[in-house]
Amino acid sequence: DGYRNTNQVSDDYRYQDGNYDAPNDSYYRGGDEPAHEEDAQSDVTEGHDEDDEVYEGEYQGIPHPDDIKEKQKKRAPAMDDEYRDRADLMAERMEDEEQLAHQYENIIEECGHGRFQWTLFFVLGLALMADGVEVFVVGFVLPSAEKDMCLTSSNKGMLGLIVYLGMMVGAVLLGGLADKLGRKQCLIISLAINAAFAFLSSFVQGYGFFLFCRLISGLGIGGTLPIVFAYFSEFLSREKRGEHLSWLCMFWMIGGIFASAMAWSIIPHYGWGFSMGTKYHFHSWRVFVLVCSLPCIASLVALKFMPESPRFLLEIGKHDEAWMILKQVHDTNMRAKGEPERVFTVSYIKTPKQVDEFIEIQSSTGTWYQRWLVRITTTLKQVWDNVLYCLTAQYRMNTLMLAVVWFTMALSYYGLIVWFPDMIRYLQDEAYESRVKIFDEEEVSHFTFNFTLENQIHRNGEYRNDKFIGMKFKEVKFEDSLFEDCYFEDVTSTETFFENCTIISTVFYNTDLYEHKFINCRLINTTFMEEKEGCHIDFEEDNDFLIYLVSFLGSLSVLPGNIISALLMDKIGRIKMIGGSMLISAVCCFFLFFGNSESAMIGWQCLFCGASIAAWNALDVITVELYPTDKRATAFGILNGLCKFGAILGNSIFSSFVGITKVVPILLASSALVGGGLLALRLPETREQVLM
């Protein structure tokens, strides 16, 4: 004791004038080496490590076992990562990810399910609603847009498919980027692209530019579905995940209802627009396109106030940011429950070993576009690596089976969704043609026609010194008739033709009776003056109202299926939900053979949509749960892109058989559903699985 006291005093004076004066006794082991300045640090700071800093003023807790392991690793001589085998690094990362998955599940359970999750639920729901709206927009505006922009049948077909093409590319690209840049950032990019080009498409006049805007708009909205489900699932505990992801799917239904209601209430109102001269027209269908961008804009604004996914941040090694967000979730939910005094007890969260890291390019290296080119190509390469990873041995079988299930579901569902309205319209046309009025060998002279002629056939008639002023021809055909000394002024026509007629000394002034409407006719001393330019919209189409109603009822019919799937998702499991729903939907397809009337077709459509929605919901849930966090949005994007490809094929194949036969579409849809449903039963069940 006496020595230690003496030695303690001598320690205060032994470093003087740059020389170290060591005591000459057997307790000293330092040798005669000169001292370093660090040796003079206080014993208070001994063992301090800046990497172990925690937030000032926050709960620090007791040392975590992982903290001790990390310190031991730092003290022990270790080989640098750059000299280690990549397989070893990946094995270490996978071990870390497994530990993180179970720890993160416990943290989410401690944070609880409350106000924060419900707020995020409605914000992401608006994004999902925008996706649902986008699917219906083009179908609703086509009847008006084809007349406003003079579209041919091929133009209409391309406009109907271009949105799905954009969504297919957007799902793969933006889904992959979400695993590298973050859920929130990529979702903002996705919604911003959709909102900007959807808004722009409502103002453009030309068909080509409108087509381009809808393509890019579809590309933007295509990324929302993979990102939304990956984003929301990472704030949910295992017990809540299946149910609340299913509730989230209801917003897709709400989007369809919103689009149908807006189309019904806006498009038929011709006065809801304006014109600038004779070249620029902003008709009511353009107002409808503008209104349909509102859910996307609302979600974009609300998303600015939501945090990034903490699970994603932990994957890329941003421990502190993730901890702060999880504490925010915990405190928000506890305050809402009336327990603000509860403390967030987590002090340390396991972060996986970082293998692939960006190397920041110095501003002095190359030009700005070269630096950006390197960043973009590096990011795209990482996305491509993620795509290939989904096909590695560990995930190949699950990916292929899910791909088949997604494709067969999309082929039958989207094919029939287009086929139903086309069949109803075909039945309407048949009924309309059955009411046609036929006039044979009529003779009219010195008469003024100033009213509408509709659904009529005039054969072998003679019209002399007649005037056709300020009138409309709708589905009117003149065959083998004579027009002599007649006068046509301010006439508009729809599906009106003159076949094998003789027209003598007749004047056509300000009409849309163009040359192609005169088939094998003899025109003698006939004059065409100031023909109408462009195409003209007829807002009195009764068929359109029924199409809006059909889409509205089809969207509304999925409500019972949504509720049932949400309540039973965590009870019966994802696999049984997919298989059962697809098999029941296949049975519904067979009853379409008995749909020979409009009401029967509407009824079977509602039944089919209600039965199939449970399979869609379960597919969304199981796709999220089968893949790890750093591959989740990529895998979802690939499968959703394949789904949109199935939608394109379904639309093209099923619509080509309208009016020809019902057998092929019904057998194709039902067989695809049966095959996909049986294959789905071989997928692994994931309801008891933590998010990796």
Image (cartoon, rainbow, N blue to C red):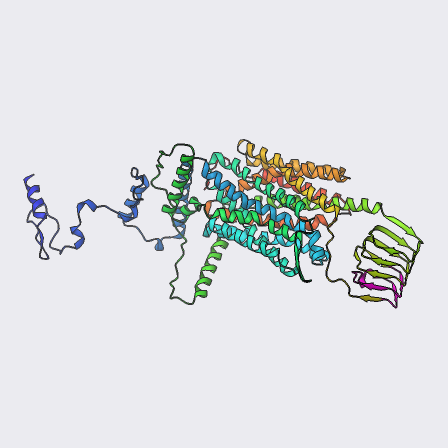
Residue that extends furthest to the bottom in the rendered view of this protein: 525
In terms of image quadrants, where is residue 562? Answer: top right
Q: Position of residue 537 (x, y in %)?
A: 72, 54
The answer, for residue 87, to whether it is visible in the render is: yes
- Frontmost residue, 227 versus 548: 548
Above or below, 486 against 564 in this view is: below
Q: Position of residue 151 (x, y in %)?
A: 71, 58
Above or below, 109 against 148 in this view is: above
Q: Is residue 22 left or right of residue 237?
A: left
- Frontmost residue, 143 versus 87: 143
Q: Is residue 319 left or right of residue 396?
A: left
Which residue is at a point 55% across and 55% down the rendered structure image?
Answer: 196
Write down the region rendered in magenta: 499-526
Which residue is at a point 39% across and 50% down the rendered structure image?
Answer: 354
Can residue 520 be found in the magenta stretch?
Answer: yes
Quadrant (top left, top right, bottom left, bottom right) of the N terminus: top left
The answer, for residue 639, to whether it is visible in the render is: no
Q: Position of residue 512 (x, y in %)?
A: 78, 60
Quadrant (top left, top right, bottom left, bottom right) of the C terminus: top left
- Frontmost residue, 689 versus 202: 202
Which residue is at a point 48% across and 34% down the rendered structure image?
Answer: 239
Q: How many marks?
A: 0
Q: Position of residue 121 (x, y in %)?
A: 50, 40
In terms of image quadrants, where is residue 95? Answer: top left
Which residue is at a point 88% across and 61% down the rendered structure image?
Answer: 486
Can residue 101 be found in the magenta stretch?
Answer: no
